[in-house]
Image (tube, rainbow, N blue to C red):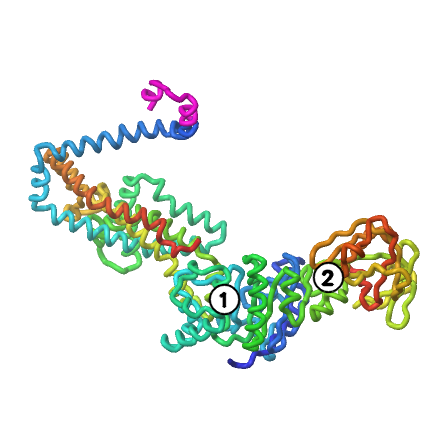
Amino acid sequence: MSAPRRLEVNEVWKSYGGDLYAVRDVSFVLEPGEFLTLLGPSGSGKTTTLMMIAGFETVSRGSIRIDGRDIADQSPEHRNFGIVFQGYALFPHMNVAENVAFPLRMKGMGKRERLIKAAEMLEKVGLEGFAQRRPHELSGGQQQRVALSRALVFDPDALLLDEPLGALDRKLREQLQIEIKELQKRIGISVLLVTHDQEEAMMMSDRIAVMADGGIVQMGTPADVYLHPATPFVAGFLGETNFLPGLCQGASEGYVSVKFRNGEIGRARPPRFGGVPATGDKALVSIRPERVRILKPGETMDSVIEGRVVSGTFLGRHARYIVEAEGQQVVVSTTEWSEATAVPPGTAVRLGWSSDDAQSLADVKV
Amino acid sequence: MTASSSGALPQPRRFLRLLNFRDSLWLLAPIATLYGIFALIPFALIVRFAFADGGTHFATVLESRILVRVATNTVVISLMTTVVALVLGYILAAGLWRAGPKMQRVMLAFVMLPFWTAVLIKNFAWAALLQDNGLANTILQGLGLTNGPVTLLHNRLAVIIGMVHYVLPYAVFPIYSAMQAIDRKVERAARSLGAGTPSVIWFVILPLTLPGVYSAALLVFVVSVGFFITPVILGSPADMMIANLVNYYVRELVDFNAGAALALMILGAVVPLIVLQQSMGRGGRHGAH
C-alpha cells in the first residue's frame, strides 16, 4: 500500500454559466489517512464538489491539488481516485473478480497477477468465495463491498464515496458504516464522503464540512460541529435543537448573556463567527434537548429559566419532555426517567443548562 | 364468441365477470377480423396449395436447378446487408445516444425516414443516383476519379445499397435501446478506474450492447431474406433472390402449387430465427434489473 496523499481543494467555484454558482469558494484539505465528510442537503453542492475532484465536472475557478500538484486539468482516468458511486455502478457483464481486477487490467497488469490481487482485496472485505458471481446475484451489502474493493485495489490517492449507503436499509447501513470505517483505519486511506445523512457523517468522520447553497458553512470534528454550531442552519441540520431568541445583554468571561422573551437571562458561548454581538443586538441561542435539564428543587445551574411541562413521552432510550418556556416550546431529552420520577403535564419546572452547552449563533441565512 | 355467449347462461354473475374481464378483448375484434381475412385465410390457402397432390410440389421445387443458386444468393446478400447495416447502425445508434436533445430529434427523423418511404420510391431513387449518368457517376467523374461512367447499377452492390437503406432502422433501434439501458455511472466508474475512451468502448459499452447487436442482426437478416422488389429494380438477373423465385413460379410458370411450397419452405427456415430473436429481447440484458 502506497502512502495516502494530501488532497487540497482550494477556493473552488463551479458555475453553469451566468451568476448561478453550484459551488462557491469551497476550500478544504483532506489530510493523509483522514476521513472527511461533506454533509448537506440536496442542492448544497456536495456532489458537484466531489465530481470536480473526480474529474467528471470541470472547475470554473480554483485549484485541486494532490501533494501540491494541480490536477484540475487532468481527465478522470488520469487521476488516481477510487470512487464508489451511488448505486455502486458495478459492471453487470463481469463477475466479481473481473470487476475488482478491472482497474489493474487498465494499468496493464497481467491476468494472473491481477486476479491474485483482486482475490486478496475480496478477502479483506469478507467476500472470498464470491469471485465468480455476477453483480446481480449479490445482495446490496455485498455489491457495496465489491464496489469498495474495486475502488481500493489499485492503491488510489484517496477514496471518494458518493452517498454509498443510500440504497440500503437502516440496519445494514449502520453495519456497513462500521465496516467501512474499520477498513479505512486498517488500510490507512484518506476518505472523502458525500452524504445528506447526519448520523452517518457523525458516525464515520474525523471531520465534517457542513455545506449549504454551494458553500461550506462550518467545518470541524463531529462533536464540535454538533455541540457548537455556527449558524441556525448547522444547528438545525445536525440533529434536533432548541432555538431561543433574545437580546444580547453583554459579554463577559468568554460568554454572552442573553435576555429571553420573558426577561430571564441565560448564558451561552459567543457565536463561532461574526464577532461578539453588542449589547442590545438580537441574539439566537441553540441548546440541544439532551443538554437542558429539568432541575430538582434547590438545584441550580449557570442558566435557569422557568416553564411548565406540556407533555412527557417515554421513548425507550430516552424520555422527551415538551416544556412551555419563554413563550415557546422547549424540548428536553433525558435518560434519567422512571415512572416514579416522571414529571406530570402542568407541573411548573425550572430548566437549566451549563453555559458551555449553549451556543449563540451567527446572524446569517445559512 | 358472440354466438356462444348468447346461448345458455347457467351462472349470470360469472358470465358478467367474464364479460368484464374480456372487455378489452372485444376491442381487438376489428384487427382480428382483418388479420384473419388478410393473413390467416391466405396462409391456409397457401398450405392447401402446397400440399395438394401430396409432396410432389415440394419435389418440383427441390429439383429446380436454380433453387440452390437463388438460395445461396439470398443468404449471401442478406448476410452482407446485415453486416453493413450493423456497422452503420451501431455508429448511428451511438451518435443518437450521445447527441443533445435537439440533434437527437433531427437524427431520429433521418433514421426513421426510410421507414416512412415506400420501398419502390427508395429503389427508384437509388436507380437514379447510381445509373451511368446519375449523381454518383457525375461526382466520380467530376472529381477526376474515373474517366468514364462506372457501372453501379444492376449489380449486387446496388442491391445491397438499396437493402441496407431499407433495413437500417431495424438495425439502429435494438442497438440504441441497448445503449440507453446502460447506466451512465457504469461508464464513469470505468473512467475513474483508469479506462480511456477506447477502453470504455471496448470493455464496457460494446459488451453491454452486444445483446442489442445480436437482436438487430437476426431482425435485419430475417427482413433481408424477404426482399423482392429491390433485386428486380437494382440488381441483375444473377442477383435473383428466393422471393423472386416464388414470383417466378406464380407469374411466369403459373404454378401456384410450387410457389406455395417454396413459400412454406422459406417460412420454415425463417421462423426459428424469428423465435430466437424474440426470445433474446428478454434474456439478453445480463440479468440487470
Is most of the magenta stretch helix, strand or loop? Answer: helix
Q: Which residue is mark 1?
A: A145
The reply to whether the magenta stretch includes residue B187 is no
Residue at left offset 9%, top offset 38%: B55
Q: List x then y, in percent, for residue A210.
A: 69, 64
Image quadrant assignment for residue A40: bottom right
Horizontal and vertical percent position of residue A87: 51, 59
- The label on residue A234 is 2
Q: Does dot 1 land on a helix, a strand or a loop?
A: helix
Identify the residue at image location x=51%, y=62%. Answer: A141
Q: Secondary structure at mark 2?
A: helix
Q: Left or right: where does residue A35 sit relative to residue B237?
A: right
Residue stretch in magenta: B1-19
Q: Amino acid at mark 2?
A: Val
Please name the amino acid that badge 1 sits on.
Arg
A288, A190: nearer the viewer: A288
A199 horizontally vs A150: left or right: right
Point out the tag, 1 or 2, that comes first from the N-terminus: 1
* Label 1 Cα crowd, 10 Å radius (few <14 / some 14-19 / many 20+): many
Q: Chain of mark 1?
A: A
